[in-house]
Amino acid sequence: MIPAHCTAPATQRWIDVERHRRSSRRRAIVVLFFLFAFAFCLASASAAPTEQDVFKSINENVGKPSDNSRLLPVLVAGAGLVLLVIFISQRINREPAPKKVASRPTKLMKEIAKGVGLRSAEMKQLKAMAQTQDANPLTLLLCPSIMVKAVQAKRGKVDRKIVVGMASRFRPPGPAGTPGAKGQKKE
């Protein structure tokens, strides 16, 4: 499409020259294509062997012993290529390895404490309560009823203030209007 400001006679002549060049190139390419196609057809048509030439060629090729020294490297290379493709496709489709699991209880406890946001004083209190109940500190975190039993047992050095603060952080909010609900003002 020619822009409206390009309608001057000089501009129009330049556009016509460009169109002529492009069409000339296209015509030249098409003519060359048909010339090569015609030459190929002539070459294949004139080289038709006679029946005697065919039998002579077959007789010569059948009588020769076969040379397998070239075939073996090609087969080995092909098998190697197939194995490489299989290996790469399995590596691409393989799921990523799962994250390494903490196999030691102390390491697991440290990771959970870091993830939950426990302070060192709270961790010490959990361990002290776990010793009184003969349980794991993780069990106390996961099961609030066992934590309540440990606090009520009053065996060992348990600081109730730290435990209550920790328990209130992990307690889910209650329904609206109850004292345990977060964001509710007490009246």
Image (tube, rainbow, N blue to C red):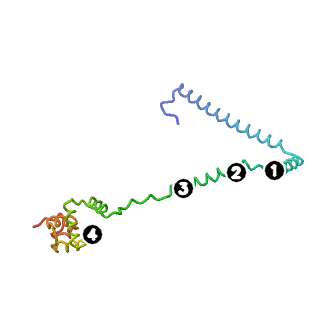
Question: What's under tag 1, amino acid-wise?
Answer: Pro
Element under disc 2 = helix
- Going by the picture, which residue comes out furthest to the top? 10
Is residue 5 left or right of 31 when viewed as pictured? Answer: left
Instruction: Check the picture and name the quadrant holding the C terminus.
Output: bottom left
Q: Residue 128: which quarter of the image?
A: bottom left
Q: Which mark is residue 65?
A: 1
Question: What's under tag 3, amino acid-wise?
Answer: Ser
Q: Nearer the viewer, residue 34 or 116?
A: 116
Residue receiving disc 4: 136
* Mark earlier in primary sequence (3, 1): 1
Residue receiving disc 2: 72
* Mark earlier in primary sequence (1, 4): 1
- For the point 76% across and 40% down, the residue is 40
* Mark earlier in primary sequence (2, 4): 2
Q: Nearer the viewer, residue 17 or 53?
A: 53
Element under disc 3 = helix
Is residue 98 left or right of 45 when viewed as pictured? Answer: left
Question: What's under tag 4, amino acid-wise?
Answer: Asn
- For the point 65% across and 51% down, the residue is 76
